[in-house]
Amino acid sequence: MPIRALLVDDHRLFRAGLRELLTQRGFDVVAEAADGAEALARVREAAPDLVLMDLQMPGMGGIEAIRRLKAEFPDLPVIVLTASDEDADLFETIKSGAQGYMLKSLDSDTAVDLLKGAARGEAALTPQLAARILAEFARADSLARAAGPAATPRPAAEVAAETLTAREQEVLALLVGGASNKEIARRLVVSENTIKYHLKNILQKLHLHNRAQVAAYAVRHGLTRPPVNE
């Protein structure tokens, strides 16, 4: 069954080229939008499996649109596709709930593979961008700790992290390393459905929305430990 995609970009020519590429690779482009407000309306009408979102658009931009989409459709994967390689855009996008961040300079094969992974619930991030996100969260945590305990009240999600099982911590460790569901299942000698079940529980316990946020949070709060096989 083809992946149903919504394209959000204010450049018609770019959307046309992207639509052709995705259609050739087996996707079904069910709708298009030129700004964030239109994207919200199209999601309600077309019910896509994922959304590809530009950042800089007239009217409602990408980050605000992501926040509104995730509030109304928390399980909908939203992947940013942008020309911006700025750290500020990257970090703010992930904090807003996006499941991935892809540069328009990516080669087509890598982009398609990342989007297919996103439809399976994986983070659509190249290893380079994932490393930058994790480094930023680690740096922010280091600064917060240096400010002293009074300046860093313990968040509810950190308390909830204590309920993670040993197996869930093993899944986290592999996820932080960039492993796909299939790779995690192989390493832990379980089925992919079992891994999906563990990931669902992890998201619920940490009150997070997607794998990218979980990976960043895990590094920031030291929730992972080296995995072992059953």
Image (cartoon, rainbow, N blue to C red):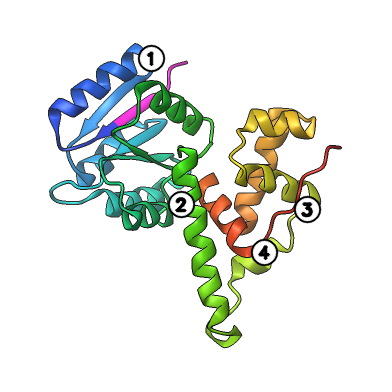
Q: Given contact means CB atoms under 8 Å apart, are the residues at marks 3 and 2 in contact?
A: no
Q: Is label 3 in contact with label 1 (beta carbons under 8 Å)?
A: no
Residue labelled with disc 1:
25
At a point 57% along the width and 50% down the height, the residue shown is: 215
Amino acid at dot 3: Thr
Q: CA distance from mark 2 to mark 4?
A: 26 Å
Residue 160, label in figure: 4
What residue did someone put label 2 on?
A: 132
Q: CA distance from mark 4 to mark 1?
A: 41 Å
Looking at the picture, which amino acid does disc 4 mark? Ala
- Of labels 2 and 1, earlier in sequence is 1
Q: Nearer the viewer, mark 2 or mark 4?
A: 2
Query: Which residue corresponds to mark 3?
Result: 165
Against 24, is 219 above or below?
below
Name the spot of residue 200 as percent of width and height, x first.
Answer: 63, 44
Indicate left or right for 157 with 70 as reference: right
The mark nearer the N terminus, 2 or 4, is 2
Q: What is the C-alpha distance between the residues marked 3 and 1?
A: 39 Å
The stretch of residues the image draws in magenta is 1-6
- Who's the residue at 62% across and 64% down the image? 221
| N-terminal label among 3 and 1 | 1
| Mark 4 vs mark 1: in front | 1
Q: Quadrant of the C terminus?
A: top right
For the residues labelled 2 and 1, the Cα–Cα distance comes to 29 Å
Q: Which amino acid does the dot numbered 2 rest on? A: Arg
